[in-house]
Amino acid sequence: MSTKQVCILSLAFVSLSVCAAMPASAQVDLAGMWSSPHHQDWVQRDPGVTPVDYLALPLNEAGREKALLYNYATQTAQMAHQCAYYMPFYLMIGVSGIKIWPETDPVAGNKIVAWKMSGFNFDVITIYVDGRPHPSKTAYHSFSGFTTGVWRGEVLETYTTHMKAGFIRRNGAPSSDQATMRQFMFRHGDLLTITSMLEDPVYLTEPYVVSRVFNLDPRANIRNTEGACEPINEVPGIDDPGFVPHFLPGRNPFVNELTDIYHIPMEAVLGGAETSYPEYRKRLKDAYVRPEKCIRYCGQNAPGLHMISDGTGRPQP
Amino acid sequence: MTSNLARCRIHALSFLTAMAAIAVVVPAGAQGSDDRQGARASARSGAPFDLTGYWVSVVTQDWRQRMVVPPKGDYESIPITVEAKRVGDAWDPAKDEAAGEQCKSYGAPAIMRVPGRVHITWRDDLTLKVDVDAGQQTRLFHFDAAAASGAPNWQGYTAAKWETASGGKSAALKTVTTRLRPGYLRKNGVPYSANAVLTEYWDLFMLPDGQVWLTITTTVDDPLYLRTPWLTALHFKKEADGSKWDPSPCSAFW
């Protein structure tokens, strides 16, 4: 080997070493524990949403009909459906923070092949960023689905398929096993913002979009496996396979609850894409009468701050 | 041997020269944020992405607090202080309207949450203009790094800078708004004070079908009325034109 070749190879080796030690230019370190501050949609996520509250959900007629059949007893009486909430979209509608960590290629060393996300109740989500394709349409559908990710500059864009049928709100508003989800993750210092777009040709007329902010929090104490949902028989004797909790069409007793308490028109309560746009607000202007006072779930308690934080209508100590 | 070493030095010199040349052509943003450099350059010509155009808010979050005026005492999701509750419990929209204070819920910390359309244009090379049809408000984002000035008003003074990522491939717009006239975070009188600081990150993304979306990450700091900073994120969809632009005046009741 000539001196020239030795020099070139040495310099190439040095430059490759330098490059390998640097993070890939397009990637941001997402690793860490991220707490969820619950500063949006607190009632839906914390104490629990009203049984018939489909506000802002772009449901089609089939989605609305299926949602109205849902009975909360499903949670206790039907083990097969107990974990149906915990699809990857649960990250947007639940209370959990998230832990994110990289999975490196054991052979290539510091090459990141996937990002993993864990949180309360849902299965670990793996975001493959190594370019692998999605499985065939007939492949197994799991609670965590199958997710790939691509860096667009410093934004991680993910795409999830192969999820089981589940729910997009904690009151039975449905998602089908044909649903797919795109997420866009933006990190700004100690803040991580995730915008999620769930598409479902079976139950939605347009993507359901939710954005949440998470706080970097080294004290969040979120583990890599945070106790994924495990079905158990919570009411002994009620696990009769012939018992299927539901409301018959047109018989959901909670359908007027939101209208009675908040004076929200029924058509908005039942969702629909058009209710999420400014034009709809203008339609409400002359029809809506503001209730005088908040009477339940008015906010979170804090030291010295006694709020009506539950459904009793009384400030809590 | 000496000759070989000399040749190697020449090759090394050539290599380092090449690396230096590469460093020169790397976008300026890749070399770290530099306020002085940002102040010299035109914010418009150096914009890493195009925010201009018409945007519509897609209200899929906090619907009951945004699409209608919530009842008095509804503080859901906002980490208020005892003092904020005292002020909020005394909310009287008729009094606000009579006092000419009907724009209190259209100030910068609240305006992007009001359902409506947003029109973004460049007023000049260093100022981005954000018009909002709800309440007919205008926000000005100043890239010239000048000190905040002027009397406090609903939209305050906003300092802006592009936060360019390594490699210059992506970026966000960061804005910090101060000098605010006290107003409401929510239509039902949840207050913010004159000392509130609003920090926003504006991120764009595109879907496979070419549709462009904007996500705004917002932090409101206000120790008088908030126990912790209030963290929210909003999203807007880009529209082809301004055909749905529909200005409406401020209202304390709606």
Image (cartoon, coloured by chain):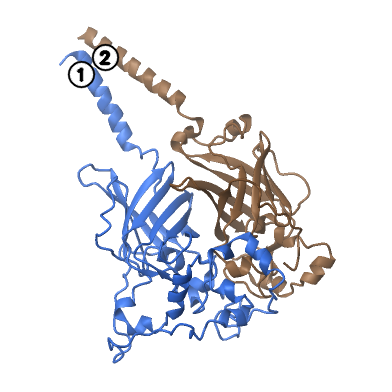
Chain colours: A blue, B brown
Q: Which residue is mark 1?
A: A6
Q: Secondary structure at mark 2?
A: helix
Q: Which residue is mark 2?
A: B8
Identify whether B207 is placed above or below B184: above
Q: Residue at x 45, y 67 (%)?
A: A93
Q: Secondary structure at mark 1?
A: helix
Q: Residue at x 23, y 22 (%)?
A: A9
Q: Quadrant of the N terminus of chain A?
A: top left
Find residue B52 and report its horizontal and vertical position in percent.
61, 42
Identify whether B87 is placed above or below B4: below
Q: Residues within 10 Å of mark 1 (few under 14, many from 20)?
A: few
Furthest residue to the left? A1
Q: Quadrant of residue A88?
A: bottom left
Say which chain tag 1 marks.
A
Find residue A5 and report its horizontal and vertical position in percent.
21, 17
Contact, CB < 8 Å: mark 1 with mark 2? Answer: yes
Q: Residues within 10 Å of mark 2 (few under 14, many from 20)?
A: some
User: Which amino acid, mark 1?
Assistant: Val
User: Which amino acid, mark 2?
Assistant: Cys
Furthest residue to the bottom? A237
Identify whether B100 is placed above or below B211: below
B154 vs A5, nearest the viewer:
B154
Left or right, B6 with respect to A183, comes to left
